[in-house]
Amino acid sequence: MTPPLPTFLLLILWVLAGCGSSADPSSKNADAQAGGERKVVYWRGPMDPTYIRDEPGKSPMGMDLIPVYDDELKSEGNLVEISPGVIQQIGVETAPVERTTVFRHIRTIGEVEVGEDEVSVVNLRFSGWIERIYVDKTGEEVTAGQALFAIYSPELVATQEEYLIAVRSQGADSRLARSSRRKLELWNISSYDIGKLEEAGEASRTMAIRAPQAGFVLHKNVVEGGRVVAGKDLYRIGNLKRIWVTAEVYEHDAPWVEVGQPAQLELTNLTDEVVLGEVAYIYPTLNKKSRTLSVRLEFDNPGVRLKPGMFATVYIQYRRKDDTIAVPTEAILHSGRRKLVFVAHGEGRFEPRDITTGLQGDQRVTEVTSGLVEGDLVVTSGQFLVDSESQLQEALNKILASAKGEPAAPADHPETVWSCPMHPEVLSDGEGRCPQCGMPLEERAGTPAERHRVYSTHAEPGQYTCPMHPEVISDEPGRCPKCGMFLEQVEAEADAMPGMDPGAAE
């Protein structure tokens, strides 16, 4: 006696069984008799589609059997027909196939730094004492030519006197005067301060040292009254209007990064703002510990929102395809080497269609290179239940063919199979290794019998199959070429299906 099906499975089968049948069997039977065109092929249980009879009657649950007509079994191409009520219950949603732009980004983390080409250092060419400091705080913003501090230096005072004597005695254009002026300029004394010296006509005890560029004081190493010697760095000034961001790119993404590629930066504290920049430099060496490649990005920084030391999320756009056909990524069903979508044709009809995909872009959009055209409607939600209904209809057709003694042809399956070069009896529907010798399986054209054996959903009694991959069927014991589990032998089953009279299969 066949054990009863679990309750939850019966509910699922009941939902799927409603796809293509009416709730009133008597009305269908009346239509069939009145029209004389529809022929009842068999009768099945409303709650259990596997309960099949060749005549009307009652199911084990006491419900009237539902007639299944020949036109319901005839598939229009590969179309799957589902009733509108079931479509609403399983929440089928569709989206049009459109031409759009598909792009992909590398997402990584970067650190904001001061650009090395935007840093200046204040360094004296002579020794002296700091008399007064005008910019005495680290982080203070300065302009180009702004006085930083005043210094007293005996060397500087002597050079001033030498220049003034040369101007008075031989004139400003004399060789000695030009030589003295040149000495002051080489000490980074500004033209403005030299002009003031000429106007005053006497040497100044202190001289102002000015900022070489605009920016912010990044480092300060002077105090008022302190002595400084020639060659010592006193101030470090950086321009933060344009900053660098150093990002780490994983080794497998490194070949896609090129100089000049556009980049985006998102701050952790300002997630709604995006700063645009580009890849400026790719470092020539790889970090041995992290196996990452350092990439330098450059961004404009108006308002100094990007502070050195910040961490930010970086997106580098490395692939882009314009005017290409694309579908939502969730619409694609992955089945081994096949990629499948369901195309909606209206009135509850859905067509499973194989596609070839290209670039899988961001924002959950995937390029389609073949299999779809612009304007097609693809199922984006509920496609798994549509696929289940398609497989259920195919299974019922095979059950009927088996009951009538007709072989089920492996339609809609590839023309090739995967086989071992040394053991041709080992067959599979995909890549793997031979369970007997371990050699990689090779793809070749399959005979109808081999295709039926590989793509059949059930193994025959006496054959061996994998518990995890029932599509793997072998005539001899061994291991599954996909998962390595031991194959199990299929035991002999009853000739008749559960619930069918022995004469129904004749």
Image (tube, rainbow, N blue to C red):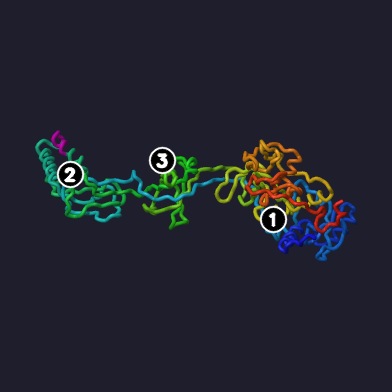
Local crowd size for mark 3, using a 10 Å CA cut-off: few (<14), some (14–19), many (≥20): few
* Residue at the spot of label 3: 285
Number of disc labels? 3
- State if disc 1 and disc 3 touch (CB < 8 Å): no
Across and down, in percent, residue 118 comes to: 33, 45
Tell me which secondary structure the magenta stretch mostly adopts.
helix
Q: Judge whether residue 77 can be spotted in this image.
A: yes
Give the CA separation, mark 3 to mark 1.
51 Å
Of tags 2 and 3, which is closer to the observer? Answer: 3
* Residue at the spot of label 1: 385
* Element on which disc 1 rests: helix
Q: What amino acid does circle 1 point to?
A: Leu
Q: What amino acid does circle 2 point to?
A: Phe
Please determine whether, in this image, residue 225 is positioned above or below residue 117.
below
The residue under the point 16% across, 54% down is 225
The residue under the point 90% across, 56% down is 34
Horizontal relation, residue 160 to residue 391: left or right: left
* Element on which disc 2 rests: loop
Q: First in sequence: mark 2 or mark 1?
A: 2
* Element on which disc 3 rests: strand
* Residue at the spot of label 2: 126
Across and down, in percent, residue 9 comes to: 72, 60
Q: Quadrant of the N terminus?
A: bottom right
Local crowd size for mark 2, using a 10 Å CA cut-off: few (<14), some (14–19), many (≥20): some
